[in-house]
Every structure is written in C-alpha cells, then in structure tokens.
C-alpha cells in the first residue's frame, strides 16, 4: 500500500462513519415520530370508547310458529318452524354492523334444526329491525328419550323451546369501525301444545326477552 493510500484511508473511513451516524439518527427520529402518532391515535380511540361505552344490542322474540316436530324410527327427528326476532340498537352515537348471524332451535338440550343464516345488515343509532328465519331439521339423530319427552309435553299442553343466535358484529363510531366481536343471543319460548300437532302450527304463547352476550 502506498503512502498516498495510507493518508486517504482514515478520512475515507471517517466520512463513511459520519454518514452512517446521520442515517441512524434520521431513522430514530422517524421511528419516534411514527410511534408518537400511533400512540396519540390509539389514546384518542380509547378515550372515545370510554366516553361512548357502547351497550350491547337488545333482542326480543316476537313470534315463533312450530309446524312440525316428530320423531321417527330409529330416533330421527323432523322439524319445521318460523321465527321473528326484534333487534334494537340502544346506542345514541354507535352503529352496529352485523356481519354474521346464524340461528337454530333446541329442545331438551338437543338441537332440533340446522343452523340458518340471516343476511348481514347495518343497524343505525337507536334503530329497530325485524329479523325472520325459517328453521328446518330433517332426519336429525336424537336421543331415544326425545319422543317420550314430546309426548309428555303434548299431554301437558306446553312445550319449551330454546333459540340461539351466534354471530359477529362491529361497532361504528363516526368513521371509525372496530374489529369483529363474537356475540350470542339466547331466547326461551313456551309453545301452546295442541292434541294434534299436525293440524295447525303451534304458536308461542307470548313473546320472550332474550339475553345477549358480547
């Protein structure tokens, strides 16, 4: 190596070191700036959430009509029913996007219809919506005791059914939309059981308030 090269090498190294230092400081400032913006936005969203505190939606079973419920050999169930649910958003400043809604019926702890999906919809502030669904079960395997339970309730003149809704929703505050939250709705209705279930549909004796979990 020549003396000329030896004289230029330290300056060359120092120049590269100084340039790398400036670049490092730039990225640090950029990182701190972006972090500050993100923290500020998250804090604002959190404060808005605390102030508004969205209440979970309310559901009410308005009507349930049972057209078929019979058990055939060997322990297979056929069922058919129509339901009408009322959904209400109690919030004054928060809208609700219902992205998924699936509903089914059960009797004595056993599912008697397959899941039926209700189309997604948006519910504005203080809005109320009517939701209808046809629930059907065809050849569903059930416990051997279910036929006896149906006969016993028929004699008593009352039959208790449970309805369950599983879904996902998102909250909307202004232009901000939350991530998805799972929710469940559970309703219990009493059907007036006639002596001949095949003659007329069984109707719910009265509407039922439902419990909602988000």
Image: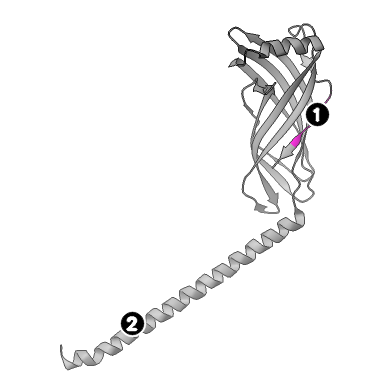
Give the residue at the far left of this rendering: 1
Left or right: 50 with respect to 42? right
Any magenta on residue 160?
Answer: no
Q: Specify the label residue 208 is tagged with.
A: 1
Report how many numbered discs are placed on residues in the image.
2
Q: Quadrant of the C terminus?
A: top right
Q: Position of residue 142 (x, y in %)?
A: 61, 16
Question: Quarter of the image holding residue 6?
Answer: bottom left
Give the residue at the far front of this rendering: 145
**Residue, x 59% and y 69% (percent of image)?**
36
Give the residue at the far right of this rendering: 206
- Closest to the camera, between mark 1 and mark 2, is 1
Instruction: Measure the C-alpha gap from mark 1 to mark 2.
Output: 77 Å
Question: Quarter of the image holding residue 197?
Answer: top right
Any magenta on residue 209?
Answer: yes
**Residue, x 30% and y 89% (percent of image)?**
11
Segment colored magenta: 206-211
SS category of the residue bearing label 1: strand
The residue tagged 2 is: 16
Q: Quadrant of the N terminus?
A: bottom left
């Amino acid at each position: 190596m020549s003396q000329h090269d030896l004289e230029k090498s330290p300056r060359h190294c120092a120049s590269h070191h100084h340039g790398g230092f400036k670049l490092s400081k730039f990225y640090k400032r950029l990182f701190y700036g972006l972090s500050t913006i993100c923290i500020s936005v998250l804090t604002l969203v959190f404060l808005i959430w605390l102030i508004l505190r969205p209440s979970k939606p309310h559901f009410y079973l308005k009507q349930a009509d049972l057209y078929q419920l019979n058990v055939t050999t060997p322990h297979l169930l056929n069922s058919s029913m129509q339901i009408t649910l009322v959904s209400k958003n109690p919030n004054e400043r928060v809208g609700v996007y219902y992205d998924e809604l699936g509903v089914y019926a059960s009797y004595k702890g056993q599912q008697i219809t397959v899941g039926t999906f209700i189309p997604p919809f948006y519910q504005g502030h203080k809005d109320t919506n009517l939701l209808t669904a046809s629930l059907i079960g065809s050849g569903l395997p059930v416990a051997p005791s279910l036929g006896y339970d149906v006969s016993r309730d028929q004699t008593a003149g009352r039959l208790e059914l449970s309805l369950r809704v599983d879904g996902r929703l998102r909250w909307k505050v202004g232009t901000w939309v939350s991530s998805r939250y799972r929710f469940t709705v559970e309703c219990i209705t009493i059907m007036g059981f006639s002596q001949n279930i095949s003659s007329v549909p069984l109707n719910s004796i009265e509407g039922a308030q439902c419990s909602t979990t988000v």
